[in-house]
Amino acid sequence: MALHPKMKILLRMNFPATLKLNTLLPGRRTCLHSEDTKTWHGVSPVWILFSLLILTGCETSTDSNAPPSNTETVTSLSKNRAKTQAEPIAINDEVNHRLKGQPVTTTLRLAKGHVKAGETVELSIILEVAPLWEIRTLDAIPSKIATQLDLSLPDGLQATGDWNVPKSHRSLTPDGHSVYAGENVFHQTIKIANNAASGERKVTCQVRYQACDEHRCLKPTAIKLKVLLQIE
């Protein structure tokens, strides 16, 4: 606490001859002093200190007008941005690798994550197309605008046939070409060789599509999905 210059003078006890503390602190002990000697009589030092504090006041150490400290606000990513690639997730032995995006979300799914030699496992590619958007079918012409599913299997695993494709729809555009809209599930059966060695296998699929609405088409998108299959 900083002392006001007047307080320093008062501490020397050189008060004016006519000053009385009972004018400062009504109801308290009266401060009497001599006109010629200016000496204090019968006054407690504590009351003298309180009187000095009332005369001079205190300085606060905090500036009430000081501007608030700068703070940094951390915001989440925009909901419209595609989320970063997530690792494959196993749920009840089902293995999924899902990439959420706009306007298409893609998922690679294995019906089970553990198999034995000689067994089969169902594999699915799921394309979730946002409302009012569409993508071309697998057999669209020219092929550069067609949806493509490029499945890559390690040794000991083999696809048993072509993709089982979902039902197509008519485009919103005037020519009414065939498209996929909404949720679309593509199925494939994978056969594990009878002599397949035990261990972990990586199954990957590159998905390529071009999303369009009634007025425009986006640039073609290519996404690589992967899941792990354990042969016991």
Image (cartoon, helix red, strand yellow):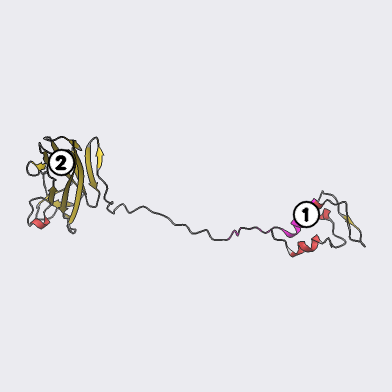
Label 2 and label 1: CA atoms lie apart by 88 Å
Q: Quick one: quadrant of the C terminus?
A: top left
Does the magenta segment cover residue 90?
Answer: no
x, y percent for residue 19: 85, 59
For mark 1, does the 10 Å Cα neighbourhood hold few (<14), some (14 to 19), or many (20 or more) residues? some
Residue placed most toward the observer, 72 or 96: 96
Judging by the rendered image, the residue that carries numbered circle 1 is: 49
Q: Is residue 48 magenta?
A: yes
SS type, badge 1: helix
Work out whether 166 lies above or below 79. above
Q: Which mark is residue 123?
A: 2
Q: Amino acid at mark 2?
A: Leu
The x and y percentages for residue 164 are: 9, 42
Q: Residue at x 10, y 37 (%)?
A: 195
Q: Mark 2 near mark 1, Cβ–Cβ under 8 Å?
A: no
- The disc labelled 1 sits on which kind of residue? Leu
Q: Which residues are magenta?
A: 46-66
**Percent from the top left, x then y, of residue 88?**
24, 44
Residue 183 seen: no
Element under disc 2: strand
Front residue of 189/16: it is 189
